[in-house]
Amino acid sequence: MLQRGTGRGYREALRRPEEGRTALWECITRDPRWDHQIEERGDYYGRLAVELEIPPTEVLAWLQEHDDVDETSGGKGWLMRDIAEWQLKAAVPGAGTTFLWIIEFGYRWEDALCSVDDIESAVPWRRVAAALRRRFPGREALRAAFDGTPPHVAARLAQFDPWFDVQPAEERAEDRPAPVRYSSQELQAASLEQLLDYGDDFKSAKLAAGEIRRRNIPIADLAPVLFRPRPRGPFVEVDGRRVRTRSGKTNPPSVIAMRSMVGRNDPAVFDAAVKVITRYRGMRHGRFQLKRFAREALVALPAGQVLPLARAWRDSRTSDMALTGIEILRRHATAEDVP
């Protein structure tokens, strides 16, 4: 019952705590989910772990043995990191030590850092800064690691250690040239390439996609843009691995092109969106914004066009395909889709 995440299993575990701890530990260490990206079980197990008083020392010992920076082994630690977060929320003594270890040595250190940011005063920020300083002794490695981290987190860390002021003076916001801003007339007069390149921030990308949709530019002209190579920065060393830093706009042309297709009742939209999701399926490809708008484009299409796809994909073991199928069924499901 705990494997299925049922309420009855939760109550039975609390009624028989010794057996409940054994069963819960088995579920946490042998994740019963098919795909952790589309099936949420962390809150369920986390609350129960706090109720059953699973010791943070056991959580830390397991992570030290099984959780590292390798993606394959790190995949086994998703639920255990959720348990650590719930223990931190509940102010369980010793939970902060586990989180500091994750930040310094663990696989998903960024998630742990954002959790500390959400749980005020749970872990002293000075100790968090010290753990990250040991993890990223090189300046370039630190800047690459913080590339996708919310800016205010780095700013808060910089209050305790100037090392975390990861933006050199010449790149700080006040010294950068202001992003291009088109007036309404300029937006209407812009070429397609100018619109696709108008992605400095969320607002400009939204305006560009809306203008492309208003012009009803053929999908055939937009589809090739979806698969353009992304601009990349130089390699740096992070956690012993060579990774590329990100480069380019917040909303690259591919995202703007896909976003402009949302809400267009055109059969070609179906083909383009399906190709995006199947080509870039899985976490290793990234392209999360691109796939998000591909899903939205499919959901907005008529039921008759997308329901066969949803029925074929909803039980897929590929997370992007399964999530797309579920989203379509939420909008268009019929009586025959009810189990």
Image (spheres, grey):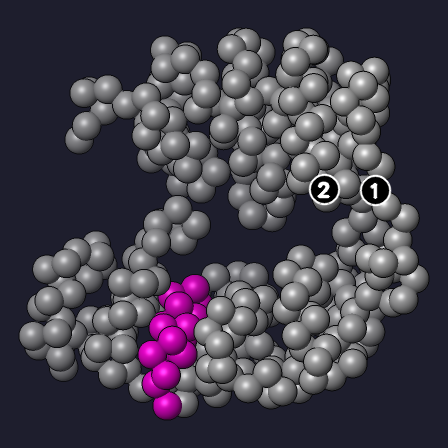
Q: Is residue 236 above or below residue 50?
A: above
Q: Main secondary structure of the magenta part?
A: helix
- In the rendered image, which residue does mark 1 sit on? 179
Classify 10 Å Cα crowding around label 2: few (below 14), some (14-19), many (20 and above). Answer: few
User: Residue at left 81%, top 29%?
Assistant: 182
Q: How many numbered discs, if any?
A: 2
Q: CA distance from mark 1 to mark 2?
A: 8 Å
Which quarter of the rendered picture does the C terminus lie within? top left
Which percent across, then down, holds residue 65? 47, 80
Q: Is residue 295 above or below residue 10?
A: above
**Viewer-closest of 251 and 268:** 251
Query: Where is residue 209, by image quadrant?
Result: top right
The part of the chain drawn in magenta is 77-93
User: Residue at left 48%, top 38%?
Assistant: 320
Q: Mark 1 and 2 residues: CB-CB less than 8 Å, in contact?
A: yes
Residue 135 in view of the camera: no
Q: Quick one: SS at disc 2?
A: loop
Mark 2: which amino acid?
A: Asp
Q: Which mark is residue 50?
A: none
User: Residue at left 41%, top 84%?
Assistant: 95
- In the rendered image, which residue does mark 2 sit on? 201
